[in-house]
Image (cartoon, rainbow, N blue to C red):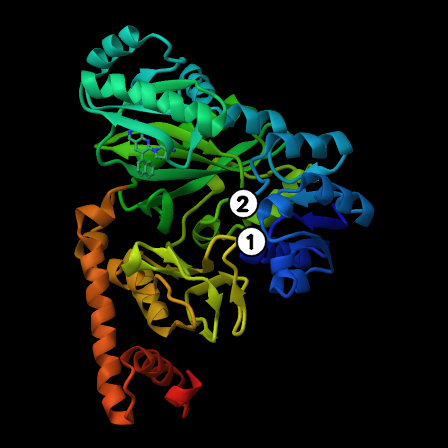
Amino acid sequence: MFQKILVANRSEIAIRVMRACREMDIKTVAVYSEADKHALFAKYADEAHYIGLPPASQSYLRMDRILDIAEKTGAQAIHPGYGFLSENVTFARECENRGIVFIGPSSASIDAAGSKITARRTMEKAGVPVIPGISEDIKDTAFALEAAEEIGYPVIVKAAAGGGGMGMKIANNKEELIDALESTRKIAKSTFGDATIFMEKYLKHPRHIEFQILADTHGNTLHVNERECSIQRRHQKLIEESPSPIMTPELRAEMGMAAINAAKAIDYTNAGTVEFMYSDGDYYFLEMNTRLQVEHPITEMVTGLDLVRKQIRIAAGETLNWKQEDIKINGWAIECRINAEDPLNDFTPSPGKLRRYRSPGGPGIRVDSGVHTGYTISPFYDSMVSKLISWGKHRNEAIEKMRRALYEYIISGVTTNIPFHKAVLRNPHFLQGELSTHFIDDFDIMTQVQDVVDSEMEKGATLASAIGADDKKIAAISAAVRMYVGDNITTKDV
Ligand code: MV4
């Protein structure tokens, strides 16, 4: 086992990884930017090293500096977390070249999953269902038009090097397709430096269901159940749950096997995720994420596994010594991503100092975060405050616990998306498990978010008149704090 691991990431995920290391008695090395010199994760580590200025390109993406620090400190392995260098082929290869263990798959597997068109072709060959479409670069417009007639409109044109919703265009007819081919090719070339494009049938209201995979370096590949991540906004996931409300044991076995085959097709090792789109009983491979994901805790809650510990053990060469039948599901887990952003103002980031901060707790609640009272959420990185995770014996209990935890959460100084989560967690369609990637638009969620904010304001205003405050917003925050803490905080303190 490793004696020392460098964590090439920041905030909550850096802490999450270091927690596993501490439990396993492995020393940790943090790397931090100028913006993070007072951050909790840098203090949590056994040692912390400065790597550069706040923009990620000058710090968290500086492979040379990070690798030098790993060598200098004697770290035998690097955990990349998610984002930053986690799916960077060059970085994984450079680790391999320098004899530092990259805690993740091989650079070749990352590469194989990286091109959407190559991945599509590999999956077709491996018998994993892919969306009807063309698995080669579209150079010939006439050929594409012919293929589209066969597939049936609407179709979607995608950049092979794209991802996260970038470089995609929907076409409803011949004219739009001619247009989409040209514009997607142009964007692909300018954004990704690769003009390769392909085409698929466009699914109108898919659900996003992904399978968590664990694969060791001895040929054992398992799935540890699915997560449903259909509640997203502009390709940013906001709420995830495990299991998926539509899952049956039969479908799980089938999709799980497809996910295992997908992983095996690219010689995958370590923890990874196979994403599917699900629509009307059919499911299709979408892409493979070759990293630990933000939403991994919900899988941990329902399986009892510690995925980071598993990652470290697999990277150290240990064997996964259970069978697929040993993997069970216990209860239900939901994750709400708590972000410093204003849901009523197009989810604009709201960085700043957390003037008051108290996270929820109690039975069935887990909070993964890297913040505390007085912490400043930097404008240089994503605006996540924490991941709020609930567990219950069944879906309703997980929902009840999440609602209660959202009520307990006290955050002042920045605007958060908590009202968004409160609105979704009482929406009748959500309660029915009626989800799709268009959930927010289909069910007019933003109007319900406004209602939540208005009703909390009203409560605050009632209290404001009692305590003689004019500023309703300050009073509302104060009311929330008083309601929960029950001490003699006055509006002046807030
Ligand atoms: C699609 C699709 C419908 N049909 N492909 C979005 C991210 C990118 N990786 C693939 N995406 C989609 N591809 C076909 N053929 C709809 C989406 C999509 C989506 C997929 C998963 C989760 C959320 C989404 C939100 C909007 C669109």
Three-letter amino acid code at the position of disc 1: Ile
Residue 126, placed above or below residue 69: above
Q: Quadrant of residue 86?
A: top right
Query: Which of the two residues, 471 or 47, is positioned nearer the viewer here?
Result: 471
The reply to whether residue 383 is visible in this rendering is yes
Circles 2 and 1, Cβ within 8 Å, touching? The answer is yes
Answer with left or right where residue 411 lies relative to residue 453: right
Q: Which residue is mark 2?
A: 82
Image height check: is 445 above or below 210?
below
Q: Earlier in the sequence, mark 2 or mark 1?
A: 1
Residue for point 56% across, 57% down: 11
Residue 13, label in figure: 1
Give the SS element for disc 1. helix
Can residue 253 be seen in the rendering of this structure? no
Q: CA distance from mark 2 to mark 1?
A: 8 Å
Rendering coords of residue 333 (x, y %): 38, 55
Check the picture and name the quadrant holding the C terminus: bottom left
Q: Which image quarter holds the N terminus?
A: top right
Foreground pick, 140 / 249: 140
